[in-house]
Every structure is written in C-alpha cells, then in structure tokens.
Amino acid sequence: VTSIIHVFNNELNRLCDELNHSDIGIVTTNVTSSVVSLVKNSVNRRCVNTDSKIAVCDSASSSSAQWPAVIVLHRVRYSEGDDLTTLYLALSRARVYCSVFIFPEEGRTLDDTPHMLPLLDNLSSFARIIWH
C-alpha cells in the first residue's frame, strides 16, 4: 500500500502543478478502505487553504461525472468481465488526460490476470498506464 500511495502522490503532484490543483478527479475501483483513506488524506493536505477542486469517488458513484484530468486506482479482481467493465467506466470519466494505476490484490501479481495484459497494451496510447 505504501508504494502505491507514493507513486500516486508523485502523479498527483505533477497534475496539481500543471492544473493549479483544480478539476482533477480521482476514481477508485475495487480499492480497500485503507487505500481510499490514504488517498483522501493526500488530497486534503493539498487542498488546505486553497480553492482546490480535487474529487475522490468510487467509480460506481461517478457515472455522470467528468474531469479534464483523472487518476484511476484500479485493483484487479481476477474476473474478466467485472474488471474490464469497471475499468472502462473509470476511464470514461477523463475528458483529456488519464493516469491508470493497476495493482493486484495482496499476495497476487498482475501475471495472474491474463485478461488484463492485452487491454493494457491497447490502452497505452490513450492513457498513462502505471504498473505496480
């Protein structure tokens, strides 16, 4: 979890610098409450004493929302249909820029998910894919 948050913070810092802390959406899918809590703490630290507009939400709660820049945190569930549908919904929240963090459940690797590999190759021209 610590390394995921570290890489997430680097990406969020980069986007905040480019977009002046505004209009960034962070969409989570299948993520544990501990990761969501760390993400929200990270966002809150950046938004203190500013007019920042950084939203954090689960993909199921974001079906009509869109932002110019989106960071997707997607934990693979090892069910091809569910993973792909959930990931596509999260990706569709971005109007211009999208970073995608894909990570496995604890104790597993992305090699355990052969259905994700071709998808990630196809998405690489549309989104910044960050493997963990």
Image: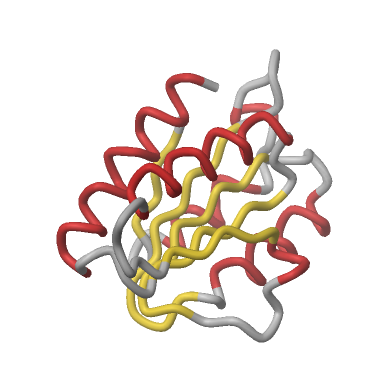
Where 7 falls versus 14 (above or below)?
A: above
Kindly give the residue lying farthest to the top in the view shown.
107
- Residue in the picture at 78% in, 39% down: 78
In this rendering, the count of numbered labels is: 0
Q: What is the quadrant of residue 96 in the picture? A: bottom left
Identify the residue shown where x is 33% and y is 48%.
Answer: 46
For the N terminus, the image quarter is top right
Q: Is residue 83 left or right of residue 110?
A: right
User: At x 25% / y 58%, what residue is drawn?
Assistant: 15
Q: Is residue 89 left or right of residue 100?
A: right
In the rendered view, tell whether residue 122 sits above or below residue 116: below
Residue 103: image x %, image y %?
57, 34
Q: Position of residue 40 (x, y in %)?
A: 54, 45
Residue 3: which quarter of the image?
top left
Percent from the top left, x then y, of residue 28? 63, 52
Residue depicted at 54% across the width and 76% down the height: 93
In this view, the residue in front, 45 or 94, is 45
Q: Residue furthest front?
A: 49
Q: How is the image coloured?
A: secondary structure
Left or right of residue 63, residue 102 in this image: left
* Camera-nearest residue between 82 and 52: 52
